[in-house]
């Protein structure tokens, strides 16, 4: 449905960039608003269904990509509690849930072409103040800043309602510090203890030792340093500088260690609900294998029903933390191994394999190794419905039946949605 489209400057020389007005028809997986215009299909982030918007659009191969300039007629559901850039779903919380559920349903139908019923989405226990980790750039005029997605623009961050209270407090403190010689600052907080760790990224570790001690005196729980690395934050060398090396965080009944330099789910109560349901679906058995297991929180939940659980991950620090947690929690049936998921076949056989890959989903070799293990049951936890749908379709072609799908909301006010799924071997 298009109501009105007006090309405002289509007479530009190259006609590749134009300002136009359009009415958004729907949101598509990935969180983009879609409008059909005489110039082609327009996709624009941050615009909501029914809204009339003014957009700067750039012509791509098969569509127009729009930057939202102005909302001319807002949706009655639009709600913006002071959202940071990147929070691209400015809707009242109740209105966000069917949209996210729809992303999973659409990926399943269009990409996987499977008819498994999608269970109602599990909402985030807290729609605001849920994030226990965040990353900031440094603003050239001082203070911490967020990058505006898809541009070089930096926006100073005075506050962010999506951050958990301990992080908001740390942000206020850090904004009073003269942070120079760094590329980024990362935060990881704990809802359990209220403590916050700071990760200083860039420069040389030895230049920040005194500053790190000062931050700890000012109330920061611990400080780490990481080298700037083109592969990503904390993918290169890291050094612990001051305070506490880890923080204790609660996922359901479990208290595990988290830190600013390695992965942990940022919305612990929402993640705990997913882990508990995954363990229920997995049932009981002799042996379970977890790929992309991080520090093994899901593995610890699975250990309630399985005699032996092996957790594997590529990240050395995650494996170290997992081993220490298993020992502290007395979970003698969980062992850890540092390994690439592509090497999964060497950890078999296993009745259950649980996977929780990054957005890119399962590499072809990993999927082949997973099938080679011939598990009777697979738990697939995903943070990208499109790559998940691609992978479950491939597993269906190799004799697995998709029995259960439930979206979980870990990231209110953003298009991101987590998927819990369960497959069984049908042949
Ligand atoms: C989405 S996280 C899931 C972690 C864990 N299941 C949790 O809930 O805390 C993905 C994990 O995959 C790991 N990873 C990424 N690529 C990998 C690979 N090729 N092989 C093994 N692990 C990998 C990362 O280190 C990260 O811990």
Image (cartoon, helix red, strand yellow):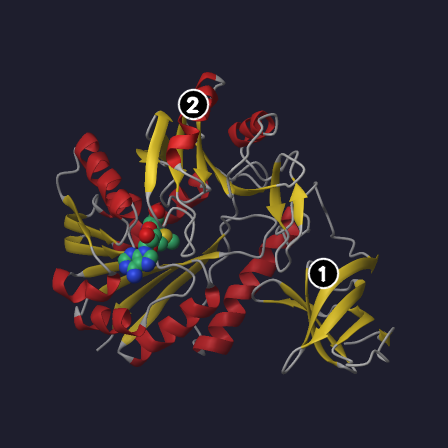
Residue 52 position, x and y percent, is 82, 64
The residue lying toward the viewer, choosing from 407 and 255, is 255
Image coordinates of residue 320 in percent, x first then y, are 22, 40
Q: Which labelled disc corresponds to residue 48?
A: 1
SS label for mark 1: loop
Q: Nearer the viewer, residue 217 or 410?
A: 217
**Residue shown at 33% from the left, 36% from the top:** 239
Residue at screen point 51% across, 50% down: 409
Q: Position of residue 311 (x, y in %)?
A: 21, 51
Q: Which residue is mark 2?
A: 210
Image quarter of residue 146: top right
Report whether 148 appears left or right of 223.
right
- Residue 247 in view of the camera: no
In the displayed structure, does residue 194 sit left or right of residue 6? left
User: Looking at the rendering, in which quadrant would you find the C terminus?
Assistant: bottom left
* 45 is higher (above) or lower (below) than 308: below
Q: Specify which label sits upstream in the sequence, 2 or 1.
A: 1
Q: Quadrant of residue 159?
A: top right
Residue 224: x percent and y percent? 38, 34
Q: Residue at x 25, y 62 (%)?
A: 341
């Amino acid at each position: 449905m298009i109501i009105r489209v007006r090309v405002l400057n289509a007479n530009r020389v190259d006609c590749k960039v134009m300002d136009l007005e359009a009415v958004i028809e729907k949101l598509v997986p990935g969180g983009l608003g879609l409008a059909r215009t005489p110039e082609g299909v327009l996709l624009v982030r941050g615009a909501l269904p029914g809204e009339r918007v003014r957009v700067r659009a750039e012509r791509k191969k098969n569509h127009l990509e729009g930057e939202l300039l102005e909302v001319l007629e807002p949706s009655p559901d639009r709600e913006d509690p002071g959202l940071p850039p990147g929070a691209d779903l400015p809707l009242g919380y109740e209105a966000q849930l069917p949209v996210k559920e729809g992303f999973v349903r659409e990926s399943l139908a269009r990409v996987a072409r499977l008819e498994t019923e999608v269970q109602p989405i599990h909402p985030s226990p807290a729609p605001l103040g849920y994030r226990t980790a965040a990353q900031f750039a440094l603003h050239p005029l001082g203070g911490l800043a967020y990058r505006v997605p898809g541009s070089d623009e930096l926006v100073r961050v005075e506050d962010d309602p999506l951050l958990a209270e301990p992080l908001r407090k740390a942000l206020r403190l850090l904004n009073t510090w003269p942070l120079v010689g760094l590329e980024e600052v990362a935060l990881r907080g704990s809802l359990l203890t209220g403590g916050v760790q700071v990760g200083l990224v860039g420069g040389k570790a030895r230049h920040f030792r005194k500053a790190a001690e000062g931050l700890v005196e000012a109330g920061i729980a611990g400080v780490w340093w990481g080298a700037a690395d083109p592969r990503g934050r904390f993918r290169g060398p890291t050094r612990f500088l001051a305070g506490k090396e880890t923080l204790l965080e609660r996922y359901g009944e479990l208290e595990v260690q988290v830190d600013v330099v390695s992965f942990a789910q940022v919305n612990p109560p929402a993640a705990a609900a997913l882990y508990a349901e995954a363990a229920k679906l997995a049932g009981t058995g002799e042996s379970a294998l977890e790929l992309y297991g991080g520090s093994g929180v899901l593995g610890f939940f699975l250990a309630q029903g399985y005699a032996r659980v092996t957790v594997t991950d590529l990240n050395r620090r995650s494996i170290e933390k997992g081993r220490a947690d298993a020992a502290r929690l007395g979970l003698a049936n969980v062992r850890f191994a540092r390994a690439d998921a592509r090497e999964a076949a060497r950890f078999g056989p296993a009745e259950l394999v649980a996977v929780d890959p990054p957005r890119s989903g399962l590499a072809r070799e990993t999927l082949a190794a997973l099938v080679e293990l011939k598990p009777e049951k697979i738990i697939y936890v995903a943070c990208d419905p499109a790559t998940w749908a691609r992978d479950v379709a491939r597993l269906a072609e190799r004799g697995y039946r998709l029995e259960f799908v439930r979206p979980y909301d870990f990231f209110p006010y953003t298009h991101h949605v987590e998927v819990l799924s369960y497959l069984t071997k049908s042949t």
